[in-house]
Image (cartoon, rainbow, N blue to C red):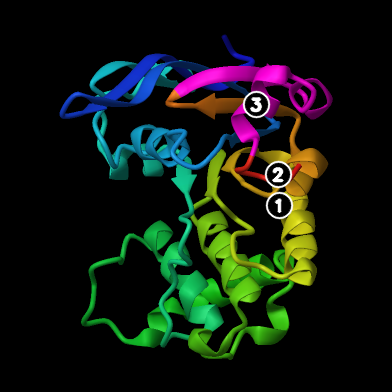
Amino acid sequence: MDDYILETRHLTKEFKGFVAVDDVNLKVRRGTIHALIGPNGAGKTTVFNLLTKFLPATRGQILYKGQDITARKAAEVAREGLVRSFQISAVFPHLTVLENVRVGLQRGLGTSFHFWKPESTLYSLNDRAMELLQQVDLANFADTVTVELPYGRKRALEIATTLALDPELMLLDEPTQGMGHEDVGRVVELIRRVAANRTVLMVEHNMNVVANLSDTITVLARGSVLAEGPYAQVSQDPRVLEAYVGSVEA
């Protein structure tokens, strides 16, 4: 049990009779990069929404670090170290890059809602914020207003703000979506670095990214687990190849 940081048991989500996630049993081993893949509409993002409590499960259980979190709220599981990024870059566009990371770090001061305090009270976070920016190759952009960043750099900033919450398990939803080749390579190396001392579960369409990063791959199709294993095994599974025909380039 201690080998797995996250587990689902018969996880199911129905929307007015439509079964979006159907009896999913998922086990994510500590210290690994685990990819959740599948054709469009396979239920990947719905699984993420269930894991991070943005949606309630219809049936089944979610276990995090051995504890049943099925009925927990989103803020509770985030405080316990299960933190998620989104398909669309979720940063504050008119704050600087440094200020965005400080927002994530501010929770540790217990001053998140002290709006009347001067900005200088946050300066103690600057050193740690710069450390995180260095991890994601954004130190040179610290004073840049975020709206001016290229798209790939915004995704790197989102990873930095996620790291600011000190996650044990990072859920990355389409981290390379919409990126050019150069940005994809940069983000792949970034994910590999930040995964060195934590667990990563990611939804990703780019099969080159999945092949380069993942220790284990779970394939969803029509809301159900179709196959699971390392890339070499999964990529040769006839059921997976059939599910992907016309959907994703291998």
Q: Amino acid at mark 3?
A: Glu
Q: Are marks 2 and 1 in contact (CB under 8 Å)?
A: yes
Q: Amino acid at mark 1?
A: Ile
How far is the residue under mark 1 from the one under mark 3?
29 Å
Q: Nearer the viewer, residue 13 or 113?
A: 13
**Label 3 element class:** helix
Q: Nearer the viewer, residue 148 or 39?
A: 39
Q: Which residue is mark 3?
A: 242
How far is the residue under mark 2 from the one under mark 1?
6 Å
Q: Is residue 128 left or right of residue 84?
A: right
Q: Which residue is mark 2?
A: 195
Q: Quadrant of the N terminus?
A: top right
Q: Residue 54, position in %: x, y?
A: 29, 42
First to last magenta residue range: 224-245
User: What residue occupies the far front of the structure in this picture?
Assistant: 246
Q: Is residue 77 left or right of residue 193?
A: left
Vertically, is 86 above or below 231?
Answer: below
